[in-house]
Image (cartoon, rainbow, N blue to C red):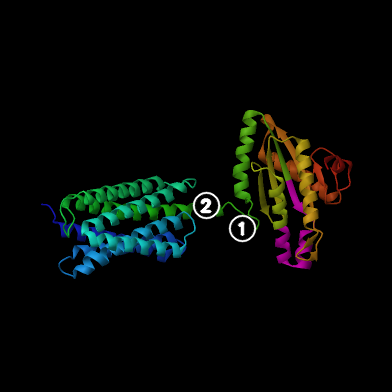
């Protein structure tokens, strides 16, 4: 048993409206997911526009053939807005409103020549808008999400169906208030797939993005933005395992801010937090992108340098020490004069063990503390202080 045209239209409108409500419910639970809000408004609005088309003969012709298509055209533009918002791209509301108004004006002019031309224009422009939404998702492909390519595929297929239908309306030999059943069926079947598919995939992508963010946050120290102890252990262990397999050098730097408790007690925790961020900035500025820097807790930091000799590691630690001494001399207009001590340990080949190297670097750090602070000590060597010959040679 086949459904008649009004029934198919009504089913399509109901499905689109329901999918929009589901997205709006998702946004109500996560108010940061604005793409779900705009996509939900677009789907729900499209459902209303389709239902007005299904009610032709029961409502005034103006409502069914002018208001309904106008809502559909506006909601197509909102789909593109939602795609831009999901892609974290800027959207100018004035340009969107101006574009929709021009679109509706063109549809009105085309409608004066015949309804089939108005329908053809609306379908064609909607097809290009949905294709633009697909391009937005394609542009954000650097962020890996499982649903990205299915979303692009559904939007492209819907856009193609609208463009083909637009050409079909233009080449139709008759003028009728109801589009020919063939293209009508294509559009509404595709719209049902689009409404269900995109709503489901968008929800899945938003959840996946949220889970990825929580996972990243669980591996980052919130104050400094560096890796935390857990992330450091996982990433450093991989480097040490690879070095043990390939026989490469690995250097580990252990840092501890000098008399940090005194800074907190005398100047306040706000200044102390600022000092920690200054040191993190020094690490980021001096180190390579491939190096691992982490805040292990309190004022303790660790750095892993892959393929780095002891001489190079000593030089890098010296640069970090000198940069921090200069940057932390004054903090927010107050004289702080914060300094840092460091211990350096280098291992190679099958002797690479993260635990043992950490202990060796910590031992060198303790010697730096005992020898007067504000200096770098290489494990198994004499100390390097701010005025030692080694510092002069590195500079």
Q: Position of residue 189 (x, y in %)?
A: 23, 51
Q: Quadrant of residue 31?
A: bottom left
Q: Going 58% across and 51% down the picture, which residue do you hit?
A: 219
Q: Which residues are magenta?
A: 254-276
Q: Which one is nearer the viewer's eye here, 296 or 340?
A: 340
Residue receiving disc 1 = 222
Q: Quadrant of residue 192?
A: bottom left
Name, please, the residue furthest toward the left.
1
The answer for how far apart the CA atoms under marks 1 and 2 are is 13 Å
Q: Position of residue 234 (x, y in %)?
A: 59, 44
Task: Answer yes or no: is residue 17 visible.
Answer: no
Tell which circle, 1 or 2, labels the residue nearer the N-terminal end.
Answer: 2
Q: Circle 1 — which element?
A: loop
Q: Going 78% across and 46% down the picture, which residue do you hit?
A: 319
Q: Going 27% across and 62% down the picture, which residue do you hit?
A: 69
Residue receiving disc 2 = 215
Number of numbered tags placed on the structure image: 2
| Magenta-drawn stretch, dominant element (helix, strand or loop) | helix
Q: Circle 2 — which element?
A: helix
Q: Position of residue 365 (x, y in %)?
A: 78, 47
Report if residue 260 lies within the magenta region. Answer: yes
Task: Answer yes or no: is residue 137 visible.
Answer: yes
| Mark 2, other Cα within 10 Å: few <14 / some 14–19 / many ≥20 | few
């Amino acid at each position: 048993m086949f459904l008649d045209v009004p029934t198919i239209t009504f089913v399509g409108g109901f499905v689109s409206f329901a999918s929009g409500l589901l997205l709006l419910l998702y946004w109500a639970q996560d108010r940061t997911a604005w793409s779900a809000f705009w996509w939900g408004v677009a789907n729900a609005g499209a459902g209303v526009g389709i239902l007005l088309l299904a009610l032709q003969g029961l409502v005034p012709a103006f409502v069914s053939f002018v208001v309904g298509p106008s809502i559909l055209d506006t909601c197509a533009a909102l789909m593109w807005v939602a795609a831009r918002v999901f892609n974290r791209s800027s959207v100018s509301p004035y340009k969107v409103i101006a574009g929709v108004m021009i679109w509706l004006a063109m549809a009105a002019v085309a409608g004066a020549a015949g309804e089939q031309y108005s329908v053809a224009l609306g379908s064609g422009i909607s097809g290009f808008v949905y294709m633009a939404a697909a391009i937005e998702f394609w542009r954000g492909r650097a962020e890996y999400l499982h649903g990205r390519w299915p979303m692009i595929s559904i939007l492209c297929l819907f856009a193609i169906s609208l463009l083909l239908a637009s050409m079909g309306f233009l080449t139709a030999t008759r003028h009728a208030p109801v589009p020919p059943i063939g293209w009508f069926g294509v559009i509404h079947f595709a719209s049902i797939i689009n409404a269900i598919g995109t709503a489901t995939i968008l929800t899945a992508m938003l959840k996946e993005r949220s889970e990825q963010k929580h996972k990243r946050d669980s591996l980052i120290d919130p104050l400094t933005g560096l890796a935390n102890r857990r992330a450091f252990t996982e990433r450093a262990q991989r480097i040490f395992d690879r070095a043990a397999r390939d026989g490469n050098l690995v250097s580990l730097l252990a840092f501890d801010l000098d008399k940090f408790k005194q800074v907190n007690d005398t100047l306040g925790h706000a200044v102390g937090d600022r000092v920690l961020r200054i040191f993190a900035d020094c690490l980021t500025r001096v180190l390579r992108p491939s190096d691992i820097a982490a805040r292990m807790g309190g004022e303790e930091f660790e750095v892993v340098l892959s393929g780095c000799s002891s001489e190079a590691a000593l030089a890098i630690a010296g640069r970090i020490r000198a940069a921090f001494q200069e940057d932390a001399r004054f903090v927010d207009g107050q004289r702080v004069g914060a300094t840092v001590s460091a211990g350096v340990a280098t291992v190679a080949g099958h002797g690479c063990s993260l635990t043992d190297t950490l202990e060796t670097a910590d031992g060198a750090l303790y010697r730096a503390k005992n020898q007067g602070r504000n200096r770098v000590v290489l494990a198994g060597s004499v100390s390097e202080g701010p005025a030692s010959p080694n510092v002069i040679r590195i500079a």
